[in-house]
Amino acid sequence: MIMKLQHKVAIVTGSSQSIGRAVAIRFAQEGARVVVNYLSRADLAEQVVALIRQQGGEAFAFGADVTDETQVKAMVDAAVQRYGTVDILVNNAAVDPRQSWQDISVADWDHVMTNNVRSQFVCAKAVFPHMKKQRYGKIINVSSVTFLTGRAGYVHYVASKGAIIGFTRALAREVGADGVTVNCITPGAVLTETELEKVGSAEAQERITEEIRKLQAIPRRQLTDDLVGVFVFLASPDSDFVTGQTLNADGGWMMH
């Protein structure tokens, strides 16, 4: 089997669980050496690393607040020291509080914008010198289908995810001549362990599932495995002439 990311080095932010975890594992299966970034759950990150190594891959965990330039630089330096460079960055880490817009304080707003938007800027800026030096790099930003739906109850979150799409397009213009592509993925309503924790009861989860089935062309819940192939495509040479794009992967919820 041909590995599409053989010998590449990838940093996946927020990869101790959920979408980031699935991406880190799949990248390793495709031959990439992976930095599993986490904020607070070192135990979960080490589980991801252990699984990758059991499957014959290479990975290590690194705890860093991706909104903090100093911590991000330390993470990138650690990747370069161990693996020689950084070829792929997946800006996945994010927060998604649910609040009525009138209940959102300025501090709440800033918290979401800092974690969801500034973090992507900080991480991209940190890896870019290494990508520019080798004249090759892949930056993949994670937005959300909620930007396309304009979902209520998430005003600060939806605004941040819209900003990521703008950031993707503008950055692609800046770095294309340096051999770096920048693209964005908008996942749909992905069933993850973090969602299950938030929703709670099986009855509530079934109501959400039924609502989503009615909205999507593919009438089932989206799983993390439904997304990983899209990330591999944008991280691999198959997409070397694709940049500044937003790839919507939501089971046909929004036809974009």
Image (cartoon, rainbow, N blue to C red):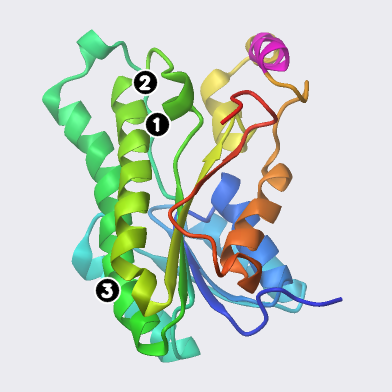
Circle number at residue 189: none
Location of residue 163 (image quadrant): top left
Q: Do the numbered discs 2 and 1 sit on residues whose CB atoms are within 8 Å?
A: yes
Pointer 1 local density, CA inside 10 Å: few below 14, some 14–19, many at least 20: few
Q: Tag 1: residue type?
A: Asp
Q: Which residue is mark 2?
A: 154
Mark 3 is surrounded, within 10 Å at the Cα level, by few (under 14), some (14 to 19) or many (20 or more) other residues, namely some
Please tell me whether mark 2 or mark 3 is closer to you in this view. 2
The local secondary structure at tag 1 comes to loop
Mark 2 or 1: in front is 2
How far apart in space, not on screen, are marks 2 and 1 (Cα)?
Answer: 8 Å
On whether residue 214 falls in the magenta region, the answer is yes
Q: CA distance from mark 2 to mark 3?
A: 31 Å
Q: Which residue is mark 3?
A: 73
Identify the residue at horizontal 26%, vertical 13% (top origin). Answer: 101
Quote the CA–CA distance across marks 1 and 3.
25 Å
Residue at the far right: name it.
1
| Depth check, front residue: 125 or 49 | 125
The correct choice, above or below, for 44 with respect to 137 in the image is above
Q: Quadrant for the C terminus, please.
A: top right
**Horizontal and vertical percent position of residue 48:** 62, 62
Q: How many marks?
A: 3
Q: Which residue is mark 1?
A: 96
Q: Secondary structure at mark 2?
A: loop
Residue flagged by tag 3: what amino acid is it? Lys
Q: Does 14 appear above or below 175?
A: above
